[in-house]
Structures are given as C-alpha cells and as structure tokens.
Amino acid sequence: YAIAKIAGLKLCEYHRRQHGRLFHAVMPCNLYGPGDNYHPENSHVIPGLIRRFHEAKAARAPEVAIWGTGTPRREFLHVDDLAEACLHLLQLDDPPDLANAGSGEDLPILELAALIAEIVGYEGEIRADPARPDGTPRKLMDSSRLFATGWRPAISLRDGLAGAYHDFLERTEAGAPREA
C-alpha cells in the first residue's frame, strides 16, 4: 500500500519533469467518513470498530476485544477535510509539490475505541487482545507544509466519528449492515 502511494508521487514528479506540467500530490493519513466500508472482515479500524461496537450493543455483549495492546497511536482525518485541503491547494498560486494531509494529532487505538464506544452507546468492557498484532507503534504525518498554507482540518474527531456512525446507521436495514 505504501509502495503504491510512493509510486504515484514519483509518477507525478517524473511527468512534471518530462512534460513541464504542474502536478501536486497530497498524501493523506488514515481517512474515515461517509461511504466508508463497514465490512466485518476487510474494513479499516474506524468503520470496523463502529460496526463491532454497534453489533455488541445490539447483542448486549459484555465485552469487545480489540487487536493488540491498544497502545499504537494513529492519526485520522475526515474525508471532507481532505476534500477541503485539496480544494484549498488548488486555489493557491504556488502550492507545495507534495503535502501530507493529516490532522496533526494522533491517539492510542484503545482511546479511539473508547470514544467510538461512547458515541455508539456501548457500555460494556473494552478488552485489549495482546495475542493479536499491534502494527507500527506510531503513525503521525508531518503536515506542516499544508498547515503553512493556512489550511487546518475543520471537523473534530468526535464530530467526525458521530457523523460516521450516523452514516453507518443510514446504511443498515433493521440494524444489520448491508453487505457490498
């Protein structure tokens, strides 16, 4: 996945050199928001947790296990904020050739899980499963180039997660998510 992103960035760079065309690349952090994939087996962390906590609440499950220790830190950006960042860069006379698009803040997965559980209304226990992999300890981008242009994300993580849960609910029938 990372190699594909880097390849795209390099293609823009080479095309610009060869053809003299102006290309700018925006590299986002972990995105979430409306229209996400809530599939139980192949979704990213936020939509996966939304679905798991929703289903645990409906089943009155006493606990939900999350993978790993819950200590790895991740950065998230609402998809609407990414769209606004891209529009912002398009309006600049001299935008950076490459800009990371992130919130500039990260949080532990366990804290993210607790926030999603609160938004969903799940009151059971959240248990870390250290037998499962943690992944990289920290993923926080340096978005200073983008921030230097005057752009900042407008949607707080809490508000964005509430909107994502609302989207999940709208995309369900009788409390069970539709499968794509």
Image (spheres, grey):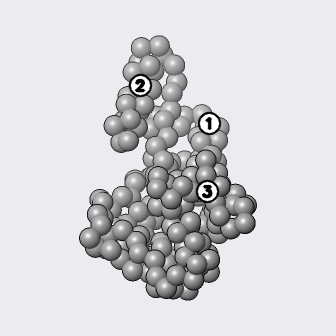
Dot 1 corresponds to which residue?
A: 90
Classify residue 2 by image quadrant.
Answer: top left
Secondary element at tag 3: loop
What residue is drawn where x is 51% and y is 19%?
21
Quadrant assignment for the N terminus = top left
Image position of 154 (left or right of 126): right
Residue 179 place in picture, x, y as percent: 61, 52
Dot 2 corresponds to which residue?
A: 11
Residue 171 place in picture, x, y as percent: 70, 57
* Amino acid type, callout 1: Leu
| Labels 1 & 2 near each other (Cβ < 8 A) | no
Dot 3 corresponds to which residue?
A: 33
Label 1 packing within 10 angstroms: few (<14), some (14-19), many (20+): few
Secondary element at tag 2: helix
Asked if 132 appears above or below 149 in the picture, the reply is below
Q: CA distance from mark 2 to mark 3?
A: 28 Å
- Nearer to us of marks 1 and 3 is 3
